[in-house]
Image: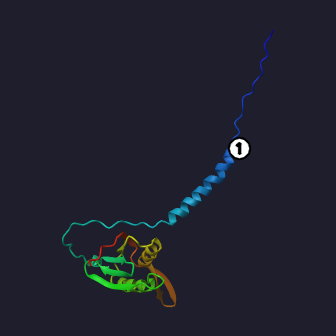
């Protein structure tokens, strides 16, 4: 008795749906990647230095430090000491006074671009970001218009020093 065999046809691979998915997915992922890249702020940790005395460079006379405490914001110079202590308002940090002070400091030291923002461990993330934004840039009135200017855009972050009792 002869054996009947079914003739099998080779299966064709249907990739049209996959190509449609790739055509839509690739531009979407590329566009999202560009927007997330624009939202990143480059920060660096302060360098650890064992030098006893640094030579004073006229371009780097200011070593600005902003320390966020629970009751105030302390603006100081690493070499010269405390410049001003800004007490917090009932609603939080007094960012307007901080911005005005930083504007005055920037007028005295126009070439300075580096600063260090130090926060205590219990500082909220929102407060840290708001202070960093105030240190980084601000608004100045020039003539009849308001101009956005950079104060100290190169920000290093770290832990606040422990206060002596």
Q: Please state which of residues 116 and 152 is positioned toward the viewer in this rendering.
A: 116
Q: How many marks?
A: 1
Colour scheme: rainbow
Helix, strand or loop at label 1? It is helix
Q: Position of residue 29 (x, y in %)?
A: 59, 56
Q: Quadrant of residue 4?
A: top right
Report the side of 125 relative to 112 (left or right): right
Residue under the image location 71 percent in, 34 percent down: 12
The residue at which mark 1 appears reads as 16
Image: 9 above or below 31: above
Residue under the image location 77 percent in, 18 percent down: 5
Most extreme residue toward the left, as rendered? Answer: 52
Q: Position of residue 162 (x, y in %)?
A: 30, 73
Report the side of 161 relative to 32 (left or right): left
Q: Position of residue 130 (x, y in %)?
A: 46, 76
Image quadrant holding the N terminus, namely top right
Most extreme residue toward the bottom, as rendered? Answer: 143
Q: Please state which of residues 130 and 79 is positioned toward the viewer in this rendering.
A: 130
Q: Classify mark 1: residues with Cα within 10 Å, few (<14), some (14-19) or many (20+).
A: few
Q: Position of residue 66 (x, y in %)?
A: 36, 77
Most extreme residue toward the right, as rendered? Answer: 1
Image: 66 above or below 46: below
Image quadrant holding the C terminus, namely bottom left
Q: Quadrant of residue 68?
A: bottom left
Most extreme residue toward the front, as rendered? Answer: 165
Image: 141 above or below 44: below
């Amino acid at each position: 008795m002869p054996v009947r065999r079914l003739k099998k046809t080779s299966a064709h691979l249907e990739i049209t749906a996959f190509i449609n998915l790739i055509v839509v997915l690739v531009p979407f992922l590329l566009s999202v990647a560009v927007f997330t890249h624009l939202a990143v702020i480059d920060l660096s940790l302060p360098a650890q230095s064992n030098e006893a005395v640094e030579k004073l460079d006229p371009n780097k006379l200011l070593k600005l430090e902003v320390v966020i405490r629970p009751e105030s914001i302390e603006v100081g110079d690493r070499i010269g000491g405390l410049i001003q202590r800004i007490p917090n308002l009932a609603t939080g940090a007094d960012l307007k006074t901080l911005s005005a002070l930083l504007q005055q400091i920037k007028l005295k030291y126009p070439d300075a671009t580096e600063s260090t923002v130090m926060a205590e461990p219990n500082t909220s993330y929102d407060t840290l970001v708001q202070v960093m934004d105030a240190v980084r840039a601000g608004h100045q009135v020039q003539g009849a218009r308001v101009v956005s200017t950079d104060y100290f855009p190169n920000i290093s972050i770290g832990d606040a020093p422990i206060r002596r009792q």
